Image (cartoon, helix red, strand yellow):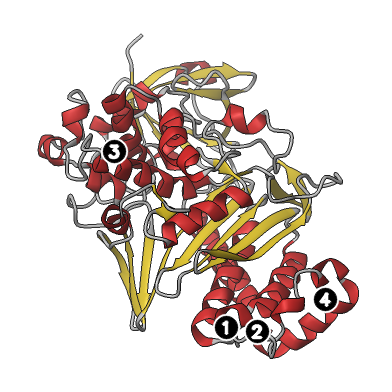
Amino acid sequence: MRIGKSIGWLLGSLLIVLPGCILLLPDWFPGQEKDPIKKVMPLFDAVVEHNFQQSLVPGAAVGVVYNDQVIYSRCLGVRKAGASEAVDADTLFQIASVSKSFNSSLIATLVQDDLMDWDDKVVQYWPEFQMYDPWVTHELTIRDCLSHRCGLPKYAGDELVPMFGYDQAEVYARMKYHKPVTGFRTTFAYQNIIYALTGELASRRTGKDWPALVTQRIFQPLGMTRSVATLADYEKEENRAYPHCLDDEVMTVVEPWCDDLVPGAGAVSSTLSDMIRWVRMQLNEGNLDGRTVVKRELLQETHSPETLISTTDSGVLSYGMGWMINAAGGHLAVFHGGDYLGVSAMVYLMPKEKVGVVILTNAYPTGNIYARSLYKTLDDLVVKGTCEKDWWADSVEAAEAAAAEAAESEKTIVLPDPPSPVVPGLEPAVYAGEYQNDFYGTVRIAVAGEGLQIYYGKNPVPTPLSHWNEHTYKDTSTGTGVIFRLGSDHQPAEMEVVVLGLDGRDGHFTRVDP
């Protein structure tokens, strides 16, 4: 059933079986409301409800701003699956990479106070910082970092935090060993570590840590009284949304993700009430309730294309500074999503129409599917006045296609069943020892029963390895290979960790002499 053809049925159903919605709808019915944007809100509300029921997401919050007014606000479901506490407008959600837009606006406030400039070099504030190429080290700017064009592969260095247990100083110190995969300033490749570097520069310039800066320069001026920027502050709030993932078709609570080491990339948690104020400021050229938080021209710079992502016959997708920009058929959308294991969020702005939507959910990946279906639907309703496409079905199809592509890619690195007969390797103790890689640092192989285990960097928790065939072991957490190669003395001299060699990375380690 296509949403465009079923809107009337959905709306009628809501009036019959969902009395909570009736309170939202009376002033919106076509014929009573002449404003074309407000007129489509009953249709949007029907989709919000219908798709929420489809999604299995435990809880969500959705708000729409138009002409600096809140014209839609809806909270659905519960904060935690299996519990009764409902999501409300003050429920705290992790917003993951939507935090990147907060970081760029924070930098904008420092630019307007003449404390920094978009084109300042990184080494002006951090002389010791280095990239692999000395010329890039010298030329890398704040603008480059905020627009994902440094030349490294996507998500470069992300594995150094959870997998290797390194602190912030060591993560950034190791970036000098990561070889680029594209030319500097030529290609978009999404980053967290390099993006968050700008937040560290802001801290070095002001003498305040990033959570304090974003609170002082963004949250407080905007009256975002419930928003926080550390995991500890999120976890101490009783009224918070717990992250969830599907486990055998059952929504299960998972541990919240921690981005405290790179806060400018994803550490913000916020509420529907607070995020509505954020959207109002973004649409109102940096102003809120008569107060200028970010100068218009500086905010506009964050919304302007810096790095090309892709082009199609229908439009151009690019990245600004903390925002994605899609220009198609004379219509402009400025947006950024955020996903962790267990949460998904989206802020989607239509500057010309003065419309923006915020969607907060406590599930992934179903929350991502839900959010996409809503902002795509709203875009159609605002621009066309109708929505003839079933964006829920389209979003499910897109997610399934992405999952199938990932599964197909995994087939090239996940070990199949062992051959028969299995070729025995050396005694496990012979492989034990330390192996070194310039970027990743040192890993340690230790004997564990009849197999091995690997300790990554400073992470005290080992990953079990089971013998697969000859000198190849299987990482039991990923199913990928850990391959030992012998030297001329028939002793292990090198080790390849396959999962660390993806997307332009180097997963080869050299054995360190005892």
Which residue, given by chain and number where applicable, does mark 3 sit on? 110
Q: Position of residue 411 (x, y in %)?
A: 52, 56
Measured in 3D between alpha carbons, the distance from the residue under mark 4 to the one under mark 1, in whole angstroms, is 23 Å
Q: Is residue 97 left or right of residue 50?
A: left
Q: Which is more toward the observer, 395 or 328?
A: 328
Q: Is residue 396 left or right of residue 21?
A: left
- Identify the mark at residue 33; answer none if there is no mark: 2
Measured in 3D between alpha carbons, the distance from the residue under mark 2 to the one under mark 4, in whole angstroms, is 19 Å
Q: Amino acid at mark 2?
A: Glu
* Closer mark to the observer between disc 2 and disc 3: 2
Q: Amino acid at mark 4?
A: Leu
Q: Amino acid at mark 3?
A: Leu
Measured in 3D between alpha carbons, the distance from the residue under mark 3 to the one under mark 1, in whole angstroms, is 39 Å
Measured in 3D between alpha carbons, the distance from the residue under mark 2 to the one under mark 1, in whole angstroms, is 6 Å
Q: Position of residue 477 (x, y in %)?
A: 59, 37
Q: Earlier in the sequence, mark 2 or mark 4?
A: 4
Mark 2 and mark 1 in contact? Answer it, CB < 8 Å.
yes
Question: In the image, is residue 27 above or below residue 291?
Answer: below
